[in-house]
Image (spheres, rainbow, N blue to C red):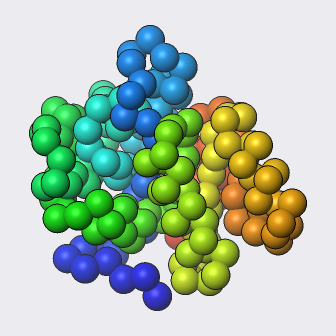
Amino acid sequence: MFECQGIHDRATMSKTVSIFGTGRAAAVDSAYELAYAIGWGLAKNRITIANGGYRGTMLAAAKGAAEAGGEVIGVTCSAFKGRANKYVTRQIVAKTLDERLDTLIRLGRAYIVLPGGTGTLLELAKVWELKNKGFLEGEKPIILVGEFWKPLVEAVASDDADSSRFVKQVGSPVEAIEVIMNIRDVRSR
């Protein structure tokens, strides 16, 4: 089992969704708007969000969650310059990039993946491989929002068709939230 060191509140963990996405999105970008809507919708459903805590889609999701009265866990990295965005209500500082990603994976009851670059690709690849190899217990869906990752999923499926069963592709924030609200542990709390 993938345990979460330093996180002992299982109720919080079962109601936390980790969101991965680009740090380069500006407020006028569709990825930013998508992240904001997801953060807002999750918070309205009393679900805590966890993300990298900085700018771009991380800022957008945090802002949406904060404006809906929700909690935001920002998992930052001491190796990076910069501060967590102002919407983070709880900051966890990791020493390395690997520790940061491991913490986001441990916190998540589900994973939402937005458009992004190599950092987001790393996040998706790691959580997908952990799920594919059975290292993540329970129902922890990986939700890809929009069409951005579709070519990658198709390419991976051409080599390992079974692996695509671990990712769910949805077209909107509403659909992503519906998937999360259908997780037994989330809806029962």
Q: Quadrant of residue 15?
A: bottom left
| Residue 96 pos. (x, y %) | 23, 64
Query: Going by the image, does 51 lie left or right of 129?
Result: left
Q: Quadrant of residue 95?
A: bottom left
Farthest bottom residue? 1
Q: Is any atom of residue 110 visible in this view?
A: yes
Work out whether 119 lies above or below 14. above
Query: Going by the image, does 154 lie left or right of 85?
Result: right
For the point 18% across and 47% down, the residue is 80
In this rendered view, identify the residue nearer to me: 106 or 182.
Answer: 106
| Residue 70 pos. (x, y %) | 31, 42
For the point 55% across and 83% down, the residue is 135
Q: Is any atom of residue 174 visible in this view?
A: no
| Residue 180 pos. (x, y %) | 58, 54
Work out whether 28 lies above or below 95. above
In this rendered view, identify the residue nearer to me: 120 or 112.
Answer: 120
Work out whether 88 lies above or below 77. above
Disc count in the image?
A: 0
| Residue 11 pos. (x, y %) | 35, 70
